[in-house]
Amino acid sequence: MQDGLRILLLNWRDSGHPEGGGAESFCERVASGLAALGHEVTVRCARYPGAAPDETVDGVAYVRRGGRFTVYPRAALALVRQRRRGYDVVLDVQNGMPFWAPLFTRALVVNVTHHLHREQWTAVFGPTLGRVGWWLKCAEALYSGILAFTRYNSPPCPSA
């Protein structure tokens, strides 16, 4: 490969996170595979106690900023700041909440949705905010025309 692509994976955690699991392992396998092919790969995720804010593992740069909820606005800000130099491809990995990458980058955005957390929205945020969050999660118009990958059949999103 002549020139590798600059690829960013947005995922809310990495596998070292105390709540990390299968989605994080998937993300890291994809990232290390892309790096092995000669691409410049960055994983942007939340920071957690004991984690280095910046680290390179298997040729993949890990940038850990923000926490459970602040990882999303921190990622958006980073994308806006990177617009000039930019990424070629951004994988917006959704684990309950999108990063809204199409709003903040000119790069090709690939949407990866492992599963939807319909019931968890109201359990975490209560009935009112839970409904708002679920609707935001389902605001698919933003991702129309975006390459998407999912492993599961998702429940239908509510009408607007």
Image (cartoon, grey):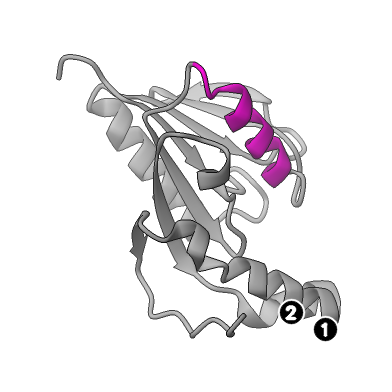
- In which quadrant of the rendered view does residue 126 lie? bottom right
Q: Quadrant of the C terminus?
A: bottom right
Residue type marked 1: Pro
The answer to whether 41 appears left or right of 155 in the picture is left
Check if mark 1's residue and mark 2's residue have beta carbons within 8 Å. Answer: yes
- In which quadrant of the rendered view does residue 80 lie? top right
**Judging from the image, what secondary structure is the residue with disc 2 in?**
helix
Q: Quadrant of the N terminus?
A: top left
For disc 1, the marked residue is: 127
Picture coordinates of residue 93, whole percent (x, y): 49, 52
The answer to whether 145 appears left or right of 81 in the picture is left
**Residue at x 57%, y 38% (from the top left corner):** 104
For disc 2, the marked residue is: 131
Residue type marked 2: Arg
The answer to whether 147 appears left or right of 75 in the picture is left
**Residue at x 72%, y 42% (from the top left corner):** 73
Q: Is residue 15 visible?
A: no
Which is the main secondary structure of the residues drawn in magenta?
A: helix
Magenta residues (range):
71-84
Picture coordinates of residue 67, whole percent (x, y): 76, 44
**Judging from the image, what secondary structure is the residue with disc 1 in?**
helix
- Check disc 2: other Cα within 10 Å, few if <14, some if 14-19, many if 20+: some
**Residue at x 31%, y 25% (from the top left corner):** 5
Which of 69 and 134 lies nearest the eye of the viewer? 134
The verdict on residue 30 being magenta is no
Picture coordinates of residue 95, whole percent (x, y): 56, 61
